[in-house]
Image (cartoon, rainbow, N blue to C red):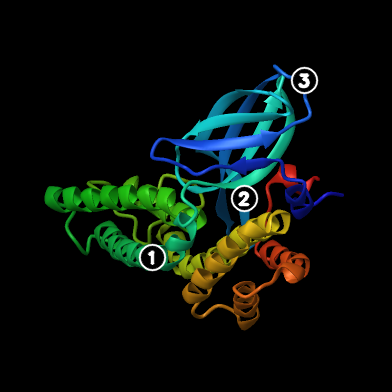
Amino acid sequence: MMNLLSILLLGQLTPGVPDERMWPLTGALARPDGTELRIDAARVERRWDAVRKRLREELSDESRVSARAVVDRKSFRARLRRGPSGVYRVAVRADDTEVLAERLVLGPPGDIPASWGTAPAKLEAARERLQGLLRTAVSVSREEAGATADLQKAFLKSLVAEETALAELGLKSDFTATVGLLGRVCELLRNAQIWGARPADDGPGALLEDGESFESLEQMLASAPAVLAAERKASVAGLLCLLAARAAENAKHLNALQGAARKAAAALEGAAPGFVAAVEATAHVGEAELPELRRRLEALRDELVDRLPEEARR
């Protein structure tokens, strides 16, 4: 059974230097000259499984780009329209058949490492603001605060601002599970039936969806720091896995791997010592140590997140 790192070791796709509009991509493919190809790239995002207390991966419905290419001397070149930076599953199809698929980091290479240091504080601040909005919703529902038109307007305006900021952060960072969790709280609060409706003391009946209540929203918000901590580690391990595989293919990528590991180590305050030690070792890894390091990083990532179903089957 071929795992993800095995696939990457056989990598035949190489991203070029991105510009403001396009992402260049080259590939090697043993097909006759003139073979027409379609290249589809979908961003790999995470979601939080509250039942299993675990992250899972899925392909974005929105962050998808595609291009056409033609095989020439067993190679091809494509230019993908720029999207949000991140890890993408890139699939190459000929005659509607997938002939090649790899994970690639698309976009400026420093974008994901930069988000490790800046996004967590923004997400925690958003969580605290949502806790305040939840308290307001509970007070209105219990008639402790009057459901005035001005309060309703201010409440909904604040929610829209939070949703907009979270959506932007989801595109600019690699913390899509945490963004999704907080976005779900926004959605439920925005649709709460508390304005001019019959009071619902503790929240049951105030939310439109079965199984959701003010108490469940409190639990979501309380779980967000743990989700963020898990996702930060998953993001670090996942990116370092990809960079380590590239470094094994070509030693010129070793500096990029070490640089990303140094940024990760600086952003991992409070993480498990064993995890931090693996990241710090990556910052100083040599070529001979890459095979064992890749296995260690992959094991750390797989402890945290379920891979895409199509990759898990390989």
- Between 87 and 133, the residue placed more toward the observer is 87
Query: Which circle, 3 or 2, is nearer the viewer?
Result: 3
- Between 209 and 296, the residue placed more toward the observer is 296
Instruction: Identify the residue at the far right of this view.
Output: 1
Three-letter code, disc 3? Pro
Circle 1 Cα neighbour tier, 10 Å, few/some/many (<14 / 14–19 / ≥20): few
> With 259 as the anchor, is 30 left or right in this view?
right
Q: CA distance from mark 3 to mark 1?
A: 47 Å
Counting from the top left corner in percent of width and height, residue 271 is at: 55, 77
Q: Which residue does the image show at 42% across and 40% down from the upper left? A: 19
Q: Which residue is mark 3?
A: 32
Q: Which residue does the image show at 33% across and 49% down from the upper left? A: 163
Q: For mark 1, give the secondary structure.
A: helix
The quarter of the displayed image where residue 295 is located: bottom right
Instruction: Identify the residue at the far left of this view.
Output: 150
Residue 117 appears in the figure: yes
Q: Earlier in the sequence, mark 2 or mark 1?
A: 2
Of the 4 image quadrants, the one containing the C terminus is: top right
The quarter of the displayed image where residue 296 is located: bottom right
Q: CA distance from mark 3 to mark 2?
A: 35 Å
Q: Which residue is mark 1?
A: 118
Q: Which residue is mark 2?
A: 57
Do the CB atoms of the residues marked 2 and 1 lie less than 8 Å apart? no
Do the CB atoms of the residues marked 3 and 2 lie less than 8 Å apart? no
Q: For mark 3, give the secondary structure.
A: loop
Q: Is residue 301 above or below residue 33?
A: below
Q: Earlier in the sequence, mark 3 or mark 1?
A: 3
